[in-house]
Image (tube, rainbow, N blue to C red):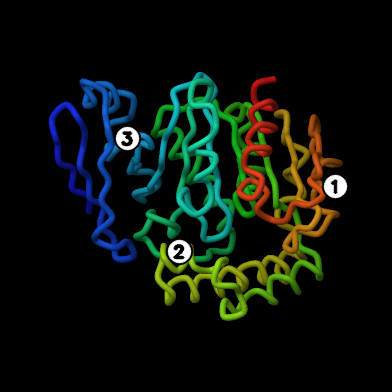
Amino acid sequence: MARVGWLGKLGYFTSLSSPLISSHHWSRRVLPQNPKTAFREQFHHNVRFYSVRRVSLQVKANGVDFHCEKCGSGNHTVLLLPGALGCTKTDFDPQLEKMNSEKFTIFGFDPRGYGRSIPPERDWSGNFLQRDAEDAVAVMNTLGQKRFSVLGWSDGGITGLLIASQYPDLVQKLVVWGANAYITPEDMKMYQAVEDIDQWSARMKEPFIQMYGEKYFRAQWSNWVKAYSRYYTDSKGDICKAELKNITCPTFILHGMKDPMVVGEHPVYLNKHIKNSRLHNMPEGKHNIHLKYADEFNKMVEDFLLE
């Protein structure tokens, strides 16, 4: 349930309430002189307007109210896809805040059961990554975006691979990092090693606990590990190997060479099997290169998108 109050020419005062979002989550943003016209008319009738810079949108698609964020007004549209249990807030602040807002229009997206796209609670259907891809495309269609580039991290990178392979007319360019098309025995050992969040550092788990509460995050993270275990056993580790040959858009693969979650063979495999792709290794990078090295990352990605 959302409440929207009008404050005159200066701005909106908004409240978004959810079982997993604290009631004091309020935001006020400065708007142009006629915000109702300037912003509402950009979107389809079933997008509800909340606040500005960043603009928070609730988008009805595939039977779910998805939370999205928008910033910028450039000609090149970009969709951000987060990692496991990630959302715009936990995963993409440096991109939403720092990427060139005059050259890009950027949409962040909380997949169903993640972030502020709750309800529904996350369930882990047999092909949950495919469902995320279909949801993301439906959201962009609702927003009236007919062609866009995709930036996907980790699980979001896999979702990006699926979108680019299945909707080639929609995807202008693709950027992925921390992603893999299959699961190795080594991968499975790594996933199982991080299933118990009590073994995580406070710095790593605190943003997720703040977002979800410990009970939901603990249960859903364990469910994520179990879902990948099913991919490993039921599909012999294959997530989307066959789909890679269908990706035709220019693709930029980035890899942190000290990534503890993605072994080095994965970006090499993607580069080998995706036509018109390039690979850039960051020697000191780990899994979160877009956060740790945000300025360098953003510059490389912007240059690639604008080529």
Q: Is residue 186 left or right of residue 20?
A: right
Q: Which mark is residue 52?
A: 3
Q: Earlier in the sequence, mark 1 or mark 3?
A: 3
Task: Please identify the quarter of the rendering in which residue 210 is found.
Answer: bottom left
Q: Is residue 25 left or right of residue 108?
A: left
Q: From the image, tell me which residue sits under label 1.
A: 268
Tell me what residue is drawn at x 70 percent, y 27 percent.
Answer: 304
For mark 1, does the 10 Å Cα neighbourhood hold few (<14), some (14 to 19), or many (20 or more) residues? some
- Mark 3–mark 2 CB contact (< 8 Å): no
Q: Earlier in the sequence, mark 1 or mark 2?
A: 2
Q: Answer above or below: position of 261 versus 194.
A: above
Q: From the image, tell me which residue sits under label 2.
A: 122
Q: Which mark is residue 158?
A: none
Q: Answer above or below: position of 51 versus 193.
A: above
Does dot 1 land on a helix, a strand or a loop? Answer: helix
C-alpha distance separating marks 1 and 3:
40 Å
Question: Which callout, 1 or 2, points to the residue nearer the camera?
Answer: 1
- In depth, the one of 290 and 191 nearer the eye is 290
